Image: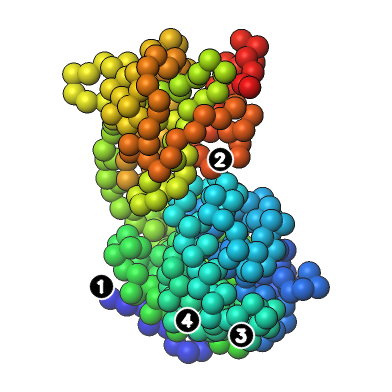
Amino acid sequence: MQEVELSEGKLADIRFALLKWFEKNGRHWIPWKLNADGLPPKPGEVIDPYPILVAEVMLQQTQLKTVLPYWEKWMKTFPTLLELANANEQEVLLLWQGLGYYSRARRLHQASKVLLNSIGAKDLSDTHSWPKDLEGWMELPGIGRSTAASIVSSAFDAPSPIMDGNVQRFLCRFLAIPSPPLKVSNQLWKFINKLIDTSKPRDFNQALMDLGYLVCRPKDTFCTICPVNEYCIAYSLRKVASFPVKTVPKELPFSVVGVGVVINHLGQILIAQRLEKGMFGGMWEFPGGKQEQNESIETTVVRELKEELSIDVDIFRKLISLEHIYSHKKLRFEVYLCNLVKGVPLPMASQQVKWVRYIDLKNYPFPMANSKMIEELGKYFSRNNLKSS
Ligand code: SF4
């Protein structure tokens, strides 16, 4: 693929136009990018890397507007790295509940411990004791190149380009790249490394992200007010909508899962903690499992609870049916209310099992798909005037 070559003079003009646009139109309010006085930092000024670390890990699979309330709550609960490193994993997962991709929370927790160990508790408030280069951050669990670049750029004003989804879309259009972004990431990195303004890298990176978010949007693109439209190849070709070139989405494997919400004579509900390893490790769930071929879903629930907990149950009501799409699979949950007929629940496929009151479910971190089940269970409890004791 032929690469676009721009002269140093043109690159300087593009940088200038982007920074000028950013000064007036950028999102200068993002809370983790402000200094201790609540102001945007000046060029070269160092700001606290911890709030940025938390935000950037949250942003790995999630949009800024979704992340904001989670980040605010997080910073109130764990205002410094020390509090996070000393927290227990259940607290951390509970706070992450609803954001999805829970391995991020666990890795962030592990990263906080590694950092605390290497920096030392008494030096945490000295920003100069923290890692300042990409390599230092990339050694931590869960921190890849993009996250590391965002941290060093935002905290230390380091000249590391950032390539989030907004920047990627902008570059693919600006250069009219005829392949899906993932296939040309080397080319994109090469170009952005040349384009970055090394005198104001933090503002430059934010300018590109903000331009992608506010102007070079996925749909409703505002090319006529774009500060760099005179250099944009897709715009000059009148083919903005054709870029970025899309990858054909793969069909996700689909399964049906039978779930049993077992209620005992005290109105308590049976929950199980998933094994540490694997998806949603350490989180809690209502027990169940995949439907087998030629099996009725009611049989699945009864079989799974016998296999996983060594109990016999009786299904007495359907609670809810819901679909959930994960990055690699699609599941339909068929959820049933059950009575315990025989046996004492044993954690044969989990870390532990517990009988809990409905109002106490909120103290246990559950994967996102379970929140609708819990909501529906709450309706069932209030309709039937039930209380757990
Ligand atoms: S001109 Fe349009 S397509 Fe090109 S960079 Fe600007 S907003 Fe994006």
Instruction: Judge left or right: residue 29 versus residue 112.
Output: right
User: Residue 245's x, y, as percent?
Assistant: 34, 57
CA–CA distance between discs 1 and 4? 34 Å
What residue is disc 4 on?
136
CA–CA distance between discs 2 and 4? 34 Å
Residue 364's disc is 2
Q: Is residue 128 above or below residue 303?
A: below
Residue occupying the far front of the picture: 344
The C terminus - image quarter = top right
CA–CA distance between discs 2 and 3? 36 Å
**First reached walking from the N terminus: tag 1 or tag 3:** 1
- Nearest to viewer (mark 2 / mark 3): 2
Residue in the image at 47% along x and 39% along y:
284
Q: Amino acid at mark 3?
A: Ser
Quadrant in the picture for residue 85: bottom right
Q: Amino acid at mark 1?
A: Met
Mark 2 closeness class: few <14, some 14–19, many ≥20 residues within 10 Å: some
Q: Amino acid at mark 4?
A: Gly
**First reached walking from the N terminus: tag 1 or tag 4:** 1
Q: Front-most of 111 and 11?
A: 111
User: Residue 117's x, y, as percent?
Assistant: 54, 77
Residue 1's disc is 1
Q: Amino acid at mark 2?
A: Tyr
Mark 3 closeness class: few <14, some 14–19, many ≥20 residues within 10 Å: few
CA–CA distance between discs 2 and 1? 52 Å
The N terminus - image quarter = bottom left
Residue in the image at 57% along x and 46% along y:
94
**First reached walking from the N terminus: tag 2 or tag 4:** 4
Instruction: Judge left or right: residue 267 versus residue 321.
Output: right
Q: Is residue 285 above or below residue 69?
A: above
Residue in the image at 48% along x and 77% along y:
137
